[in-house]
Structures are given as C-alpha cells and as structure tokens.
Image: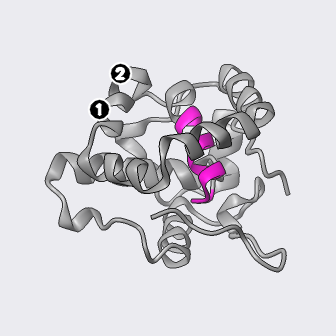
Amino acid sequence: MLGSPVENGYRPEYTRGSSSQTLRAGLEEYYRENPGLLDPQRMDAAAAALFRSHDAAHVVFGCDTTLRGETLIDLWTIFASTIGLRGYLAYLRLPQVQALFAEVGLVQIAIELARCTPDALRVIARSRRLSAKWPWDDYRAHLDERLADLRRSFHIRVLSGD
C-alpha cells in the first residue's frame, strides 16, 4: 500500500537530510507513519528479508512511500546499493510487489516516472558520487548510527534537503 502525500507541510524526520535519528529510530518512525505497509512477519524468510532491506533503504535515502518516493527508492536501490539490478529484479518479482503494481497500475507508474525524471536523474548522478554502495543485506550493522552520520559517511545526499 502506497502512502499519501504529506499534509500541512509535515514530513517525517527520516526524510530530512540532517536527521539526527538513528537508523533504528528512523525505521520506527517509518513504520509508525505507514501502518498500511505489508508486514514482513507474514512472509517467507526470503521475501521478508527483501522487504526489510527495502524499508531500511527508504529511511537511509530519505524517501517516503508516495508513488514518487517509491519510484525514487527503486532508483536509489538499483544504482546506490549492493543489491544491484539483478537482485532488485528478484524483489520486483515477489507476489506482494506484483500485487502493488497491479493495484497502482503500470500506466500510473510510468506517468510518475516521467513526472519525476529530473529527480530520477539527480538520484543517478548522486549515486555515482557515493563513497561506497549502501549495504542492502547488512543494514542491521548500522541500526544504531545516526542518519546524518551514515549519509555523510556514504556521501548520500537525500533529495528532500532540509
């Protein structure tokens, strides 16, 4: 289930580039702000691991769960994490993800990709400047690090700024 756009100017702390939250606190906020997300505890182990890594990437790269945020996190994941395109295709083939695509519709997804092309190009450019790719399978090693420090360490510049 995709989240709705932020109302009244509020946006989650984890989306701010200089967030002082730890990754763990950012994930707690992410789950609290998105109660309609698919629950990894109700999935087989392989699917749950992919979803948890995807959720951690949302927080690290400061992307919300709107259609725009989902489009951009896909690009961040492919270009800026260790999973790469082949691994991410395995995520996209999960029945849960396919159901989300069917719910939203491929036409709507294509329209959103076109709409956020300038940001998509920024993601690709910023991905090339990272000091290292985000460790998709090893995010737990960073749970107690501050997001601002993680982003500085990896040279991640979130799109939302501050």
Q: In the image, what residue occupies the spot 51% across and 72% down?
A: 34
Q: Do the residues under discs 2 and 1 have CB atoms within 8 angstroms?
A: yes
When asked about the image quadrant of residue 26, the answer is bottom right
When asked about the image quadrant of residue 25, the answer is bottom right
Range of residues picked out in magenta: 64-76
Viewer can see residue 140: no
Display coloring? one colour
Q: In the image, what residue occupies the spot 37% across and 41% down?
A: 138
Q: Position of residue 68 (x, y in %)?
A: 66, 49
Quadrant where the image shows the C terminus: bottom right
Q: Position of residue 115 (x, y in %)?
A: 75, 40
List the residue tagged with mark 1.
Answer: 90
When asked about the image quadrant of residue 15, the answer is bottom right
List the residue tagged with mark 2.
Answer: 86
Could you say whether the residue bearing mark 1 is in a helix, strand or loop? helix
Residue 84 in the magenta stretch? The answer is no
